[in-house]
Amino acid sequence: MLPFAEDIHAADCISKSELLNQDAELQEVHGYLRSCDPTGERFATVLRDTIDQLLNGEATGRYDWKTLFKTEKTHAGTLVEINLQREFKFNDGGDVADGRHPMDYRILGIDVDCKFSQDFGGWMIPPETMGYLCLLVWADDYQSAWSAGLFRVRQEWLNTGRNRDRKLTVKAEHRDKILWLHHKAELPKNVLLHLPESTRNQILLPGGRKGQQRVIELFRRVQNQRIGRGAIRTAAQQLDYMARLREGKGRARTVLRNEGILIVGPYSRHQAIARQLGATVPHRGEFVSFRVAEAKAHHGARPRVELDGRYWVLADPGDPEEVAPQLPKVTAESES
């Protein structure tokens, strides 16, 4: 038995609030997902990681969605579905033995299908989902934005499928029937994609055995911005890409600290330092670099932090380079 009441199907003019009030399962799943991820950070991280997984910059050096093969773009929906299930530990959907069409997930005992599109409104909905809930997900690296919402699949809200497998799309005028979890939210930025070409070329140096230098250039030239693991992987193009970041002879933290540049990671102690300085604070899986200077009278009352027994501020362009202090030791990068 489909969960959506038959009398709802007959009421084309019913208001959205009335429709939602009569669809207890829609409200229930929506409330559960919101409780699992109130800010949307977990959803956003999954989408960022999935796009980076497709780009596979570690092996390919790619950073632009347009460079993906058609088959890779087609595979994106499957990866989003898998990675969301891993993150939120959704149960598998019903199977044929239940006398129902198999959906992707079962959330609170309710079958939910998952559809992803890189084009907003381009979700391809198969006929067998009719009457079920769909989790509609969109992400766009060029806009650095994403959305996710729940939609009760109804024939009158869909465009007729003209493709070979008769898949349907949501009519533009009925996208207001989507109950958004998060809409046009911020997607962690694909830093390399959004850099000026001249800067990107200074980072992505051609040739082998340049991984360490590319990582150093990334954090030297992209300061006070969140840099995700995907960008580090693409710059390093090495399996041990995080080793390029750590303290050690010739490695990024040591080389750049001698230039007054700190690289803070997604650890509470590092985040506190960035916050105290008024710098950008890294989130899960992100790192931020910024140049510091020992606090002097001309810095006035600007935010400062005590490290190595001295007070430091974010450096002005005119401040001379000086060796930056050591950051507090934290858990290994690989654990973040």
Image (cartoon, grey):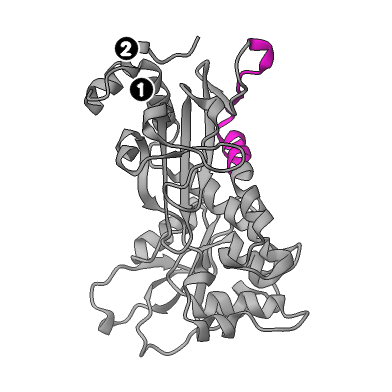
Is 61 left or right of 187, judged from the image as shown?
right
Of marks 1 and 2, which one's residue comes earlier in the chain?
2
Q: Secondary structure at mark 1?
A: helix
Cα gap from disc 1 to disc 2, whole angstroms: 18 Å
Q: Look at the image and give the residue range highlighted in magenta.
A: 80-98
- Residue 92 colored magenta? yes
Residue 146 vertical placement versus 102 (above, below): below
Residue 173 vertical placement versus 72 (above, below): above
**Point 37% across, 87% down: residue:** 317
**Point 34% across, 68% down: residue:** 304
Q: To which quarter of the image does residue 16 belong?
A: top left
Q: Nearer the viewer, mark 1 or mark 2?
A: 2
Q: Nearer the viewer, residue 190 or 320?
A: 190
Mark number, residue 27: 1
- Residue 167 colored magenta? no
- Where in the figure is residue 125, as x and y percent of width and height? 51, 36
Q: Main secondary structure of the magenta part?
A: helix
| Whether residue 5 is visible | yes
Mark number, residue 4: none
Residue type at numbered disc 1: Gln
Q: Nearer the viewer, residue 3 or 87?
A: 3
Q: Nearer the viewer, residue 148 or 331?
A: 148
Q: To which quarter of the image does residue 192 belong?
A: bottom right
Residue type at numbered disc 2: Asp
Residue at which label 2 appears: 7
